[in-house]
Amino acid sequence: MSDGDSDGGKVTSMHDAVAALVRDGDTVAIEGFTHLICFAAGHEIIRQRKRDLTLCRLTPDVIYDQMIAAGVASKLVFSWLGNPGVGSLHAIRRRVERSDPAPLELEEYSHFGMVSRYTAGASGLPFMPLRSYHSSDLPKVNPRIVELESPYGDGVVYAVPPLNPDVSIVHVQRADKDGNCHVWGFLGCQKEAAFAARKVIVVCEELVDGRVIRSDPNRTVIPGLVVDAVVPEPRACHPSFAQGYYDRDNRFYVAWDPISRDPAKLEAWLEDWVYALGSHKDYVAKMGAEAWARLTPDQCMSEPVDYGAYSPG
Amino acid sequence: MSAAPADYSVNEMMIAASARQLEGEKVCFVGIGPPNIACNLARRTVTPGLELVYEAGVYGADPQRLPLSIGDPTLVTGAVSVTSMFEIFSFYLQRGLIDVAFLGASQIDRFGNINTTVIGGYNEPKVRLPGSGGACEISINANRVFVIMPQSRRSFVEKVDFVTSPGHLAGRRPAEWPGGGPYVVVTGLGIYRFGADGIMYLSRLHPGVTVEQVQDNTSWDMRLSPNLATTDPPSELELNLMRIELDPEGIYTR
């Protein structure tokens, strides 16, 4: 993605990043546990009419309800399928319960299973052991969850296979042009999903100088080493949130329920808020200043830390 | 707004009774929905020192508002520690540091096996439910599991349609695994515990509820405690906290 522009590093637009890195048939993870879910990336994938994707997320959330309703996916890999705090994701349920308008293949784990899959993928391991699934029906419906004797003779564990997405899309608070990322608040599986993926798109609230990143290296969750594209796109997570930047829009999550229940309403929503808009900047403008004011939190700064300066001699 | 104790909903009784179960506990893993309100109510009443753990990756949360989801930013600000999800599940849960986990359920059987995956067959679901989330490993690794759920013949079933989170039934977890399984179940009708044989019994009835009502809303013959007691109704303090601070829109409590 760096196409020879040494000053710009890996910086590109959402349109160009999705066009260049997401192919039909890919396994794609837009991660972020409630926090830092990059809705803008999902909307761009819808606009570009990608098809036959395998979508991975612990919690498909409203973004995958929208993407699956728009027809971009044929398979879902997940561990909790709901609208958090509200109820169901009805577009996904229609496909699962009634194949309406088409079947959707499911591959189901628990949260710890999905976290362990990304961790195995990020670690270059063939599987990850965990203490879960014993006497549960989950291994019966997912043969990739396998009971295993400990090689040290201390009982059984369960193994899950690595998850290595073709593309992981992770949102972060700030990144430099090379893709070194600072993240704070819930970390979800952003780090594991990035290290596990073949290609990584980082979307950031703020593009900062590399010196800002180096001023606080403990906060660097993802290094540019594993990043292919950096997309500066403020407010790209709405109705999810970015800690310290904007709040979770709980009203939107509640309002999504009746839209998601009615295919015609859902289609109209996609038309108004995705297809009719050229980019996420239009979406941010369409929401209006009042909505953004409502979602802006008061400040709560951390105490600074002293890393020390260690000069020669 | 002050509440007359005689005037409360079934859900308010269920949540208040659940919160009281946490008295004396130290580290609590909090599930989504009603458990979230009950744990936050406990922290404001019977257990101010309760350390709240959320699967999103937080230990020692100090929420200033009731989080609608269990991944709300208010759980981060002011918390003791924010961790990766791998650390929460591995170092805190699997390591055996969770005293109590509070979970919801769609179906439960007499052994405390919980279904949150599907009503009907897995491949031909009548209703597709959310699935495990962290519940499967939480039910296996937490020292004790508390359950809060509405009770009816459709939720208290002879056999769950799918075992998402195992209870005390056959194939009990390996001895070297940390968890002790389901310990108490709180519904809108009463409070249930488990005998040494792993079978559920009615321990307390909520005010005004009869044993007959419990039996009418259970698909098996419910055992009764020989010392069957009655729950205290929600106090004015509990009701005010729920109505004013924790769930002003009444999403879970009405």
Image (tube, coloured by chain):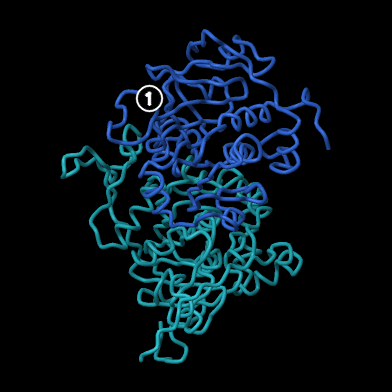
Q: Quadrant of the C terminus of chain A?
A: bottom left
Q: Residues within 10 Å of mark 1 (few under 14, many from 20)?
A: many
Colour that chain A carries in the picture: cyan
Classify B197 as above or below A142.
above
Residue A192, how many percent across, how many down? 38, 62
Q: Inspect the image, locate mark 1, and give the three-letter code of the amino acid beneath it.
A: His
Which image quadrant for residue A124? bottom left
Measuring 59% from the left and 37% from the top, which residue is drawn there? B47
A76 on left or right of A172: left
A290 on left or right of A31: right
Residue A275, how many percent across, how many down? 60, 67
Q: Which chain letter matches label 1?
A: B
As drawn, the chain in blue is: B
Residue B7, how many percent across, how many down? 78, 25
B1 on left or right of A265: right
Measuring 57% from the left and 42% from the top, which residue is drawn there? B49
Element assignment for label 1: loop
Residue A112, how many percent across, how many down? 38, 48
Measuring 72% from the left and 44% from the top, which residue is drawn there? B245
Q: Which residue is mark 1?
A: B168
